[in-house]
Image (cartoon, rainbow, N blue to C red):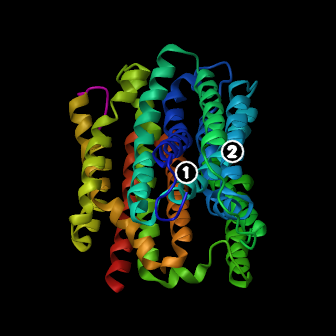
Amino acid sequence: MTLETGHPARTRIMALMAASVILAVALVAAVNLAIPTLAASELRPSASQILWIVDAYVIVFACLLIPAGAAGDRFGRKGVLLAGLGVFAAGCLLAALAPDVGTLIAARAVSGAGAALVMPASLALTVGVYPAAERGHAVAAWTAATGAAGVVGNVGGGAVMEYLPWRALFCVPVLLAGVLAVLVAVLVPRAPRLASTPLDLPGTVLLTTASVALLAGVIEGPEAGWGSGFVLSAIGVAAVLFCVFVGHQLRAARPLLDPRLFALPRLRAGTLGVAVTFFGLFAMFFVNARFLQEVKGFSPLVTGVAIVPLVVPMIVLSRLSGRLPARPAVPAGLAGIVAGLVLLSFADAAMPYQVYAVGLVVMGAAMGVCLPLLSHEIMAALPRERAGLGSGLNSATRELGSAVGVAVMGTVTATHGMSAGYRVVAAVVLAGGVLVCWWRGRD
């Protein structure tokens, strides 16, 4: 292989990397299809435990993405990818065999750690086997795979839940991860290591612990009581740890995430915009499966297919968004997400699916318009040599927004119902969108 010609098997390698990232991301969406079955299973999880089953994966995934990229540089990307697939499979196997809810939640966290190792290593390996002239195409194909993962997760998860027990949802990824690991070991070349790449382990621990503490306060609020000692302590610990994290990052020679970067208005706008976009999307995913199965009487497979009206306009408009002027397109897209959430807040048993699908189409089209532009804001705000940080920040922000969106939607729905949940989420997206537009206007 040379820098000019690339690896002779680069197309197969890219397909393998795309399959790896689809597997990691698809499990986020697939688990939502299993919520009604899990709720009625022999484990009998409470409402807050169901939120932990969903969010344990996402929050660990989010917090480890940036350090996982550094680990790939330091220890070898192929080795880290294989380790990620192994850890992911081990977590899924433990989830499939879980005798109780606590074990299932812990297993989901283990799988999330594996997924975090897979994501940056798969992108770096994809780029590494292509010549410079073709790397833009390779990155676009990898990015498209992350988008396709939502469809795969919904349809694939729906198909599994249609015909098999809920434990099969975690058995299938074990088999797929094993096959992918063998193919990676045989087909993918090793990339050079960068031994000097720093691993900010204290920063990683602080960020992860603070994020988990915040989610604990939000998720346990309805059952424990918002004024309870546990909830107040969790939120207080989260606030303290986030402050300690910022202080540590300001002092560190090579920080995990330098807070001073957020002095750049475009970076602030891009990260907040991506966060609130996925906050709204995954809040919707969390209640969509239960609504369609429990209220509308859809089967799991039909429920998985029913999300397609959201995905199609998202994919189509994402490909066209680069031609749109960012100044009007970003506010229009964020406003469209709010409008879609408000439309879905009126859903009930009497609403025809065709009307419900209008809300999905509005949300999908709005995300397709603004999300690529917001991601570009993150990358464009940083110098070219910090592109790896920009990619990691974009992915981590997306997953953190998703985790908090699930927690907030589940918490509000448990106490005030689905309609109120949608409206609270819409209000958060609206407030975040206003800040995004203000910061972009100041740049």
Q: For residue 32: magenta?
A: no
User: Which x, y percent locates residue 23?
Assistant: 54, 38
Q: Is residue 115 visible?
A: yes
Dividing the picture into quarters, in which one does residue 252 lie?
Answer: bottom right
Rendering quarter of residue 134 = bottom left
Residue 421 placement (x, y as % from top left) = 43, 46
State the residue position of label 1: 403
Using the image, tell me which numbered label, if any, was put on residue 82.
2
Disc 2 crowd rating (10 Å Cα; few below 14, some 14-19, many 20+) is: many
Quadrant for the N terminus, please.
bottom right
Q: Which residues are magenta?
A: 346-352
> Considering the numbered disc 2 on the image, is that residue within a helix, a strand or a loop?
helix
Along the viewing direction, whichever of 13 and 35 lies nearer the viewer: 13
- Foreground residue, 118 or 157? 118
Question: 213 or 305: nearer the eye?
Answer: 305
Q: Residue at x 73, y 72 (%)?
A: 198
The image quadrant where one finds the C terminus is bottom left
When the figure is inspected, residue 17 is found, relative to residue 2, above or below; the finding is above
144 sits to left or right of 260:
left
Would you say the residues marked 2 and 1 are in contact, meaning their CB atoms lie under 8 Å apart? no
Tag 1: amino acid: Ala
Asked if residue 348 is among those painted magenta in the image, a careful observer would answer: yes
**x and y percent of residue 427 in the render?**
38, 59
Q: Report whether 328 appears left or right of 5.
A: left
The residue at 71%/61% (across/down) is 71
- The image shows a total of numbered marks equal to 2
> What secondary structure is the stretch in magenta mostly built from?
loop
Which residue is pictured at 41% across the width and 48% down the height? 281
Dividing the picture into quadrants, the one containing residue 325 is: bottom left
Tell me which amino acid carries mark 2: Leu
